[in-house]
Amino acid sequence: ETGVTQTPRHLVMGMTNKKSLKCEQHLGHNAMYWYKQSAKKPLELMFVYNFKEQTENNSVPSRFSPECPNSSHLFLHLHTLQPEDSALYLCASSQEWSSRYNEQFFGPGTRLTVL
Amino acid sequence: AQSVTQLDSHVSVSEGTPVLLRCNYSSSYSPSLFWYVQHPNKGLQLLLKYTSAATLVKGINGFEAEFKRSDTSFHLAKPSAHMSDAAEYFCAVGSGGYQKVTFGTGTKLQVIP
C-alpha cells in the first residue's frame, strides 16, 4: 500500500453505536490530520498530531475521540453521534506540522452516515 | 487570521476551452498557497503550491496558477479543458510559523463534451 489509506470507506451507524475510523500513512510523515467535509461547507480541520502529540483540537465535541499510537497510524473513535455528524471524514499527513510549505497528502475518506 | 474565498461554486466549460478558477486570499503573513483537486469518492490531491519563489507556478495535468500580491489572488488556469478535469477544486492558504491550512469552499468544474 502506498500513500494514505483509510478504513472503512463507508460506515453507517446508529446514534448509540461506538465505532472507529482508521488511517494509515506509508509516507514516513510525522504529522497527521483529521478533517470533516460536509456538503456546502469548507473543509473543517478537527485534530492535528505531530510526532504523536496532539497539537490542535478545533473545539471538536467530545463524542469524537482521536488516538495516535505512532506516527503512521491515526484513529478517530466515535460514540453517541448525531445525524449532523454525517459527512466525509478525511485523514491527511504531511512531513511535519511546523513548516508552512509542507503540502498535505490525503486519504480517500470514510463516508459516515449517522441514523 | 487567514481566509480563502473561491468566487465561483460551479464553473462549466466546453472541452478544449480554457479553464479559470478564481481564488482570493487574506493573510497577515507571507502566505503559502495551494490548489487541490478532488475527484468523486477520492481524497484531495495537490495540484500545485506557491511558497514565495516564482509567482507563476506550474502544476500537474497542465494546470498553473499565478500569485498576485497586489490583488491577493491565486487563480488556477488551464489552456484547454479535458473531460478528466471534471472534479472539485479547493484553494487553500497557510501562513504563520506553522502549517495551519485554511481551505476554501470549493469550485465544481463541469466539462461539457
Image (cartoon, coloured by chain):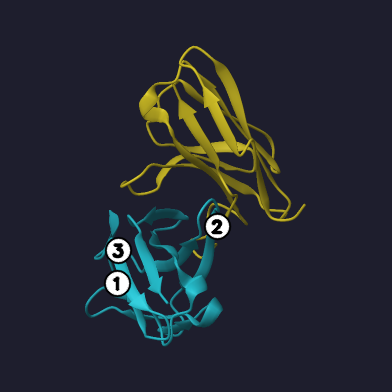
Chain colours: A yellow, B cyan
- Marks 1 & 2 on one chain: no
Residues under labels 3 and 1: Cα distance?
Answer: 11 Å
Q: Which residue is mark 1?
A: B22
Which numbered disc, 3 or 1, marks the residue that appears first in the sequence?
3
Judge whether residue B75 can be spotted in this image. no
Q: Which residue is mark 2?
A: A104
Q: Chain of mark 1?
A: B
Q: Chain of mark 2?
A: A
- Marks 2 & 3 on one chain: no
Q: Position of residue B75 (x, y in %)?
A: 33, 76
Residues under labels 2 and 3: Cα distance?
Answer: 24 Å
Q: Secondary structure at mark 1?
A: loop
Residue depicted at 69% across the width and 55% down the height: A3
**What is the three-letter code of the residue carrying label 1?**
Arg
Is there CB contact under 8 Å for labels 2 and 3? no
Residue depicted at 24% across the width and 65% down the height: B7
Q: Position of residue B11 (x, y in %)?
A: 31, 69
Q: Secondary structure at mark 3?
A: strand
Rendered image: mark on residue B78: none
Residue depicted at 53% across the width and 65% down the height: B46
Q: Chain of mark 3?
A: B
Q: Taking A103 as reference, is A42 above or below it?
A: above
Which residue is nearer to you in this view: A20 or B42? B42
Q: Which residue is mark 3?
A: B10
Is there CB contact under 8 Å for labels 3 and 1? no
Is there CB contact under 8 Å for labels 1 and 2? no
- Outermost residue, top side: A16
**What is the three-letter code of the residue carrying label 3?**
His
Closer to the eye: label 1 or 2: 1
Q: Secondary structure at mark 2?
A: loop
Closer to the eye: label 3 or 1: 3
